[in-house]
Amino acid sequence: MAVQPDPRRGEDLYSEHCSNCHSPGAWGKGAAAVPALAGQRGTAEPPVISFVGGLSERETQAVADYISRLQSPVPGSQRP
């Protein structure tokens, strides 16, 4: 059974676990080599998995859903 999207929960989890490094708008921090996440679709990259290891699969899905709804800082760079 598919997990229903929960963008509000994803936003809360992103704010708590991700925004410190990736910025509140998920635009990343280029000078610190932290990538933008806004507009990405899919799963976390291997280095990130250790940081989100405490999140359940459902919570990880909620964060991914939230991130996918954000506008990318680079026009035309939304991932399919």
Image (spheres, rainbow, N blue to C red):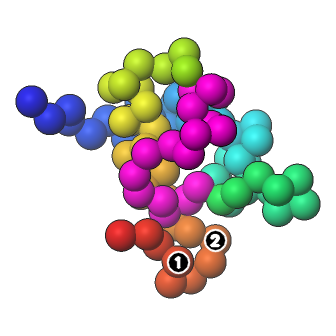
Q: Position of residue 35 (x, y in %)?
A: 70, 57
Amino acid at dot 2:
Pro
Q: What SS does tag 1 mark?
A: loop
Numbered range of the magenta stretch: 37-52
Tell me the crowding category of disc 2: few under 14, some 14 to 19, or many 20 or more residues within 10 angstroms, Cα based: some
Q: Quadrant of residue 9?
A: top left
Outermost residue toward the bottom? 76
Where's the C terminus, which quadrant?
Answer: bottom left
Reading the image, the residue beneath label 1 is 77
CB under 8 Å between callouts 1 and 2? yes
Q: Position of residue 15 (x, y in %)?
A: 62, 34
User: Residue most toward the right?
Assistant: 31
44 is within the stretch colored magenta: yes
Image location (x, y in percent) of residue 64: 43, 44
In the rendering, at what x and y percent does residue 10 appear?
Answer: 44, 35
Q: Which residue lies at the image location 37% right of the left edge and 36% below the top edge?
A: 61
Q: Is residue 25 left or right of residue 33?
A: left
* Closer to the camera in the image, 1 or 20: 1
Q: Residues within 10 Å of mark 1 (few under 14, many from 20)?
A: few
Quadrant where the image shows the N terminus: top left
Would you place residue 28 above or below residue 56 in this image? Answer: below
| Image disc number at residue 73 | 2
